[in-house]
Image (cartoon, rainbow, N blue to C red):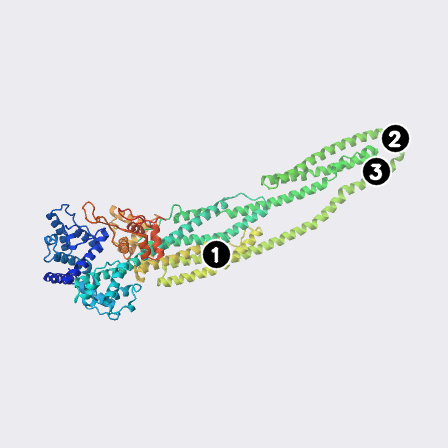
């Protein structure tokens, strides 16, 4: 027992001895004590649904005395005897007196027999002993206790008030101003102290009694007339009544402290739950975006036209430049939020956050890999499709051109071959027609290759899935059908001309004489006609067409040369930027990696340096945008190769995303170190020691330790692990347990943050579920069930009730925190609780339990 406790005990015992020597009470004091002690007992017994009417009679059987002690102590007493005989009553009173003695109280001249016999003085003495022990003894102000502590508290609280001078617990309270001052000091809304008069003691006392009973739940324990008309009011009665004010107001301060603790704990949970909800929301949105995007990237069904495929390529460019970069940042932010949340949970001794099914960080990473796998090759497919369509377009244009030339050549040929001009021609004319027909047949045979070329082009367009293949096939079929028809008509005309020639030869024999005389002229005429017709049909037209095509071909070649020169300039322009940007990005990635592995200085200095690096990186974004513009010009010009650089736009994009993610993760690591340092009181030297050890065993220089390296790191720092040095089975079990702490997701690596958390896990101070339960208990007040209304039966014991009502929560807590509790507290299941009672014990445990998010 320490000196302070011993002094308190001695003071308490001295008061008891004073009472014991003063067995004869002043009648006025006896009346005041009877009224005050009865009211004080009933203020506690009413919590159990009962009361006493006559203080010396109602405690005689010991039942309500035991009940009173249970209520005010919150502890269970031995089971009372059920009998009604005198020895049963004495046994019960002795159980009560033994309980009082067990609390360190030495009972002087108080025996069970006197209480059972209804001895008023002994009963009042016993109740005063109980009041001293449970209502006054623990009052302490500046290392004083009991009576002195209560007096000092009263003096301090009433010091600013006029006409109040508290020096004792009798005459200082007669005018009622001291009581009114106590109330006004704590609840100025209840009393207008300025209107009180010192010459109206009864009015002042009654005002204090009425206000205390109505608003402070302090029953009226004294009569104003008795106090005023007694030269020296009973000290014990005054002390008992004033102690109720102390507990009421001190309880309010205690409730405020409890409410502050609860609000602090709830604020931590609310912030964590907000982060959890934000994580869930962001994860859901990101996964949904990936779910919608992957099928689009996996869809390799080409469009029929070049313009449609170019729109697809433009959509993909928008995806890479506009749509994906924000999602990359979201994914990075998601990982940062998750790491920060887990750090805060560990620091506040809350369990780790377990996202809902399918939304783990690993699930996000797997989905993202699926996205990039679908994205991989999509642009190459688009470009190959555009090349295919470009070739198709070229072939289609070639087909149309040759078909048009062929159709122009055949135009009118069927009508010519169907003419029956030979029927009225002479023999020479028929023979001329035959010669012209032979020349046509030669020309027709020469066009056979063109028709076959047209058919071959149509076949190739079909094999390459040309979108207008039906139209091509139809035109090709028409050309082939026409060609076959021309062949048929050509043969028919030859047959007809040959028959006509034979017929005219017969006629010519009949006109031989005439023919011989007219032969020179006819020969000359036929020759001239033949020569004129041959030159016009064969030589002159073709020569004219060739002369027209040669300049056109030269112009096309010149245009193609100009286009290739522009393309080469675009290639060089892109390569010049890419050859500068690519190494810059790679250098920054390596620089950030070195910063993460070997940062020196305080965390604030490290953060400032990283923020500056981040700003430099952000400022460089305009160079990436310009390169994207040049890349778009190349694609629009259908340029897909570049011998002047090894960096493609895709390489630059991937490197840029890696750089942004790397700097963001490094900044978040330092932020979490700040949280850990502030929560656990780590010095910069300790953090530097942890960092140096971690870096030494980070063999791959990737910011993570393998399990074997982590084991070696712990041993190097002198960490005492059972059996680790010997690698015995027990040591392996212990190390496996530690790995579950630092690597809860079984990723097979230990991050720096997890390493710090493990090394400092015992140093942080935090609220516990038990402390929160105790705080709620203060706000809820003592609640009991059982005991009946008049008698207390052993079969109906008094039980504490750990529930709180919505009304009490709204009264004691800020609105937001009160509603938070009301929404989440489960109904109280205990017997005898009112409707709407809420279980704060289960709720407090859940605050530190598994999250249901």
Q: Residues within 10 Å of mark 2 (few under 14, many from 20)?
A: some
Image quadrant where residue 572 sits? bottom right
Foreground residue, 557 or 577? 577
Q: Quadrant of the N terminus?
A: bottom left
Q: Position of residue 683 (x, y in %)?
A: 30, 62
At numbered mark 2, what does the secondary structure look like: helix, strand or loop? helix
Decide if residue 339 is in sight here: yes
Q: Camera-side residue: 209 or 43?
A: 209
The alpha-carbon separation of the residues under discs 2 and 1 comes to 98 Å
Residue 80 in picture, x, y percent from top left: 15, 48
Between disc 2 and disc 1, the foreground one is: 1
Tell me how far mark 3 sits from mark 2, CA to CA: 18 Å
Q: Residues within 10 Å of mark 3 (few under 14, many from 20)?
A: some
Question: Residue 666 in the image: x percent, y percent?
Answer: 39, 57
The residue under label 2 is 512
Q: Which residue is mark 3?
A: 526
Q: Residue furthest bottom?
A: 162
Of the two numbered discs 2 and 1 on the same chain, state the one appearing first in sequence.
2
From the viewer's perspective, tell me whether residue 84 is left or right of residue 739. Answer: left
Q: Is residue 533 above or below residue 128?
A: above
Q: Which residue is mark 1?
A: 582
Q: Position of residue 112 (x, y in %)?
A: 11, 53
Mark closer to the chain start, 3 or 2:
2
Dot 1 lies on which element?
helix
- Look at the numbered disc 3 and give the secondary structure of its residue: helix
Q: Are marks 2 and 1 in contact (CB under 8 Å)?
A: no
């Amino acid at each position: 027992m320490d000196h302070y406790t011993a002094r308190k005990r001695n003071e308490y015992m001295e008061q008891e001895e004073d009472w014991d020597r003063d067995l004869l009470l002043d009648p006025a004091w006896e009346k005041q004590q009877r009224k005050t002690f009865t009211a004080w007992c009933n203020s506690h017994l009413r919590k159990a649904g009962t009361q006493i009417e006559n203080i010396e009679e109602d405690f005689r059987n010991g039942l309500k005395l035991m009940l009173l002690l249970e209520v005010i102590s919150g502890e269970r007493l031995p089971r009372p005897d059920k009998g009604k005989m005198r020895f049963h009553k004495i046994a019960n009173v002795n159980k009560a007196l033994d309980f009082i003695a067990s609390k360190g109280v030495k009972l002087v001249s108080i025996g069970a027999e006197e209480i059972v016999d209804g001895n008023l003085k002994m009963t009042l003495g016993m109740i005063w002993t109980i009041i001293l022990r449970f209502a006054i003894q623990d009052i302490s102000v500046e290392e004083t206790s009991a009576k002195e502590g209560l007096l000092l508290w009263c003096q301090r609280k009433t010091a600013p008030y006029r006409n109040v001078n508290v020096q004792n617990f009798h005459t200082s309270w007669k005018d009622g101003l001291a009581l009114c001052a106590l109330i006004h000091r704590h609840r100025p809304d209840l009393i207008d102290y300025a209107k009180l008069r010192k010459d109206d003691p009864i009015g002042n006392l009654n005002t204090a009694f009425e206000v205390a009973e109505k608003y402070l739940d302090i029953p009226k324990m004294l009569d104003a007339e008795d106090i005023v008309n007694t030269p020296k009011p009973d000290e014990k009665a005054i002390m008992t009544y004033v102690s109720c004010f102390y507990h009421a107001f001190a309880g309010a301060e205690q409730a405020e402290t409890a409410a502050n603790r609860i609000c602090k704990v709830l604020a931590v949970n609310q912030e964590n739950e907000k982060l959890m909800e934000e994580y869930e929301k962001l994860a859901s949105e990101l996964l949904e975006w990936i779910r919608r995007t992957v099928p689009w990237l996996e869809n390799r069904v080409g469009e029929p036209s070049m313009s449609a495929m170019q729109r697809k390529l433009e959509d993909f460019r928008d995806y890479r430049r506009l749509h994906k970069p924000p999602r990359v940042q979201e994914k990075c932010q998601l990982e940062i939020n998750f790491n920060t949340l887990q750090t805060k949970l560990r620091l506040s001794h809350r369990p780790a956050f377990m996202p809902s099914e399918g939304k783990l960080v690993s699930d996000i990473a797997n989905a993202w890999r699926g996205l990039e796998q679908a994205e991989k090759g999509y642009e190459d497919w688009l470009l190959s499709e555009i090349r295919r369509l470009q070739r198709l377009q070229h072939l289609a244009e070639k087909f149309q051109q040759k078909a048009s030339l062929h159709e122009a050549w055949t135009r009118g040929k069927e009508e010519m071959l169907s003419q029956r001009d030979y029927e009225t021609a002479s023999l020479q004319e028929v023979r001329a027609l035959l010669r012209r027909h032979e020349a046509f047949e030669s020309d027709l045979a020469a066009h056979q290759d063109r028709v076959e070329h047209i058919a071959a082009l149509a076949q190739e367009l079909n094999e390459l899935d040309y979108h207008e293949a039906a139209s091509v096939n139809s035109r090709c079929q028409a050309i082939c059908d026409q060609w076959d028809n021309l062949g048929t008509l050509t043969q028919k005309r030859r047959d007809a001309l040959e028959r006509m020639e034979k017929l005219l030869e017969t006629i010519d024999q009949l006109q031989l004489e005439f023919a011989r005389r007219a032969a020179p002229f006819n020969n000359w005429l036929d020759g001239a006609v033949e020569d004129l017709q041959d030159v016009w049909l064969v030589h002159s037209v073709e020569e004219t067409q060739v002369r027209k095509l040669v300049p056109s071909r030269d112009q096309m070649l010149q245009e193609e040369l100009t286009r290739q020169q522009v393309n080469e300039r675009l290639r060089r322009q892109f390569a010049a930027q890419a050859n500068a940007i690519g190494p810059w990005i790679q250098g920054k990635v390596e620089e950030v990696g070195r910063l993460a592995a070997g940062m020196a200085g305080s965390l604030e200095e490290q953060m400032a340096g990283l923020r500056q690096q981040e700003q430099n990186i952000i400022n460089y974004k305009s160079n990436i945008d310009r390169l994207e513009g040049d890349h778009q010009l190349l694609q629009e010009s259908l340029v897909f190769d570049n011998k002047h650089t090894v960096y493609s736009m895709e390489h630059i994009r991937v490197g840029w995303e890696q750089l942004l993610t790397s700097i963001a993760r490094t900044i978040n690591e330092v932020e979490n170190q700040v949280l850990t340092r502030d929560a656990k009181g780590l010095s910069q030297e300790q953090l530097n020691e942890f960092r140096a050890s971690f870096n030494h065993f980070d063999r791959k220089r990737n910011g993570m330790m393998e399990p074997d390296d982590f084991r070696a790191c712990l041993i190097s720092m002198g960490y005492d692990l059972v059996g680790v040095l010997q690698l015995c089975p027990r040591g392996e079990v212990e190390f496996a347990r530690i790995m579950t702490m630092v690597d809860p997701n079984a990723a097979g690596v230990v991050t720096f943050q997890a390493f710090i958390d493990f090394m400092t896990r015992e140093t942080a101070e935090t609220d516990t579920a038990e402390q929160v339960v105790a705080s709620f208990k203060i706000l809820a007040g003592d609640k009991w069930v059982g005991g009946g209304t008049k008698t207390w039966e052993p079969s109906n014991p008094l039980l504490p009730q750990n529930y709180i009502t919505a009304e009490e929560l709204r009264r004691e807590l800020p609105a937001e925190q009160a509603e938070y509790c009301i929404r989440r507290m489960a109904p109280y299941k205990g017997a005898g609780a009112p409707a709407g009672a809420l279980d704060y014990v289960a709720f407090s445990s859940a605050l530190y339990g598994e999250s249901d998010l």
